[in-house]
Image: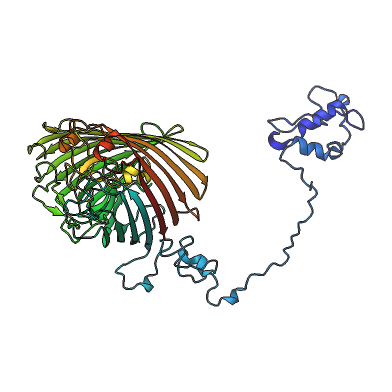
Amino acid sequence: MAGGSLWPVIATLAAQGAPGGDVTPPPPPAPDGPPVARDAAPAGQPAEELIPPPPPVDWQEMVKDDLVTDIIEGRRRPGYRPDLPDALTQDNVGALRPPPPQAFPGMEDQLPIPDRWRLIETLGVVKERWFDPYNQNTYKGDRPIDRSKVKWLPIKGDDWFIVANAVSDTVFEPRTFPIPVGVQTTERPGSLDVFGKDRSFVFAQTFIAGAALIKGSTAFKPPDIEYRVTLAYQANYVDVPERRVLDVRPSKASHRYDSFLGVQELFVDKHLGNTSDRYDFYSVRLGIQPFQSDFRGFLFNDSQLGVRLFGNRDNNRFQYNLAAFWRLEKDTNSGLNDITQTPRSDFIFTGNLYRQDFPVVGLTSQISVTYNMNREKNDVQIDHNGFPVRPALLGDLRGREYDVVYLGYSADGRIGRINVTASFYAALGEDRNSFFTSKPAEIRAGFGAVELSYDYDWMRFRLSGLYATGDGDPYNRTEGGFDAIFENPIFGGADTSYWIRQTIPFAGGGRVIAINGRNGILNSLRSSKEEGQSNFNNPGTVFVGAGADFDLTPEFRVSTNFNHLWFENTSSLQALRMEGSIPKDIGFDLSVATIWRPKATQNIVGRLSAAVLLPGKGFKDLFDNKQKNDAYVSILANVILSF
């Protein structure tokens, strides 16, 4: 009630009749003017007619405590004290008293620790072990290095981290594929057919060791500066049934052991600045560095010498790259970077822009422009086994150079419940010397690949398709066969697929030429994916596939792939083979792969896959032989250990 007055309550009680007789409540005081005495008669009125004053009333007895407290919410009558609850008691049996300040003389308000990163170790909660990657580890970048222990490092300031990694990659690969018989000599007397035995195997052991020195914590922002180096050493052994397959000299045996040390990363990454309080940034990276031009590695997926400006905007919704690369020579048998040789006269300039949630939420779109400028017309490159790789031994055998621009659009993400990955490219440019005509030719080629998948509980079902144009007329002024710069696609089963994993030599009509490259899907007729040049006089590729992944447990996955391949146009094959017609059907590529991760992490991964190629009419026309092979097989056993 306003002002806290009890007058309305008293008036109500009086009107209803209070105990002790009828009571007339006194009138409220006048709002203005001096008070009027009740005993004095007003002017003109006799004194005997005055009303006597009412008897005294005990108002506190009339107004009960509970009524007052209920009506006047939040107020309490003076002098009223409600009963208090019982006092709380707490017993902490076995509790230890904190040590008194005297136990820490001179450090009453603090404890000495090296830094906040090593707090739990200082308190004895955990003890760091250098070989344990699962808990806090200085060598994995979980805490900064102690500069007092590495005085030989030329670094200044705090927050320097070191990240070390080591990988062991073991591969054993039995396979069968068409193997030409040597021209000058054979492994077995009387072996006079075009193709000999087809069984061979490869064993390769690769050790990868890398380290990075990073300034600044990277939990919420890019590093201030990063120095990184990665070396790879591979030892490999190959056994084939025919001579002049592993070495140009027929005197060499049909088996070979080789080893090589390559530099796969050697760069400096400098953080130039931030453009927002959400750590949108821009940085520059200089040196040998990995780069992938699209989501699945269809056009360019390699580690090369270059400079790259990259960053993001709009809370990371936009990402961009501007890069230039100078291609390094590769070791022939391992495929690793060979920095002991002069870099190639082959340059790549690329720029791309990513946009998240475009054109629909959940899908990331990318547009890109890539320019490949090749100036190797006067280069003659012989690989480590003695085979010429530049220029390719096709057609007029003359050197080539070319300029080609790839305009691309790629997407990756999901639309509703459907996972989507797609890439499309148009290749436009000029070949200075077409090896069919010895004249300049325009490059006009196209490429498209799409993979759709659907997740149902622990299963994923996939549909995939790829189309790369082939050259329709090798003798005109246009080259229409699509070829990449350096492909390494994660598509259609990847390296568990027979066609992607194995290199099929194109014997007859071309020397030391393969229809496709190892770990490549395009039928490009190149001498080598690593050391050769792009070739736009090729038959193209058509690919349709279906597959499924089954996560039987968190540690065990089974993947299956069912693919069918065709040549898009066989005109270039007919011209090289001097045949009137060659069917387009390559055949069916069937594979199954198992992946086992015993710790449910990527530190130990075992893979075992088997793939079979059931040749179609086109493949049989190109590679018919005495054995009349109805199927070719590829087995891949792979164990990867990572730290």
Screen quadrant of the N terminus: top right
The colour scheme used to paint the residues is: rainbow
User: In the rendered view, would you say 283 is above or below 236?
Assistant: above
Q: Which x, y percent locates residue 634? A: 36, 47
Which residue is depicted at the point 55% across and 77% down?
A: 105
| Residue extending furthest toward the top | 44
**Is the C terminus in the top left, top right, bottom left or bottom right quadrant?**
bottom left
- The residue nearer to you, when weighing 62 against 206, is 206
Which of the 4 image quarters holds residue 577?
A: top left
Residue lying at 29% horizontally and 33% vertically, measured from the top left: 617
Above/below status of 634 relative to 446 = below
Residue 403 in the image: x percent, y percent?
A: 14, 41
Q: How many marks?
A: 0
Residue at the spot 42% in from the left edge and 59% down from the top edge: 641
Q: Is residue 392 left or right of residue 413?
A: left
- In-image side of 247 versus 215 (left or right): left
Q: Is residue 338 above or below residue 518?
A: below
Horizontal side of residue 43 vs 169, given as left or right? right
Residue 282 placed where, x, y %?
29, 49
Quadrant in the picture for residue 42:
top right
Residue at 53% from the left image edge and 74% from the top image edge: 107
In the image, 216 versus 601, the foreground residue is 601
| Residue 407 picture quarter | top left
The answer to whether any part of residue 604 appears in the image is: yes
State whether residue 373 is above or below residue 35.
below
Residue 315 visible to an observer of this rendering: no
Q: Which residue of the protein is positioned furthest toward the front in this rendering? A: 190
**Rendering coords of residue 557 (x, y %):** 48, 46
Return the residue nearer the eye: 614 or 460.
Answer: 614
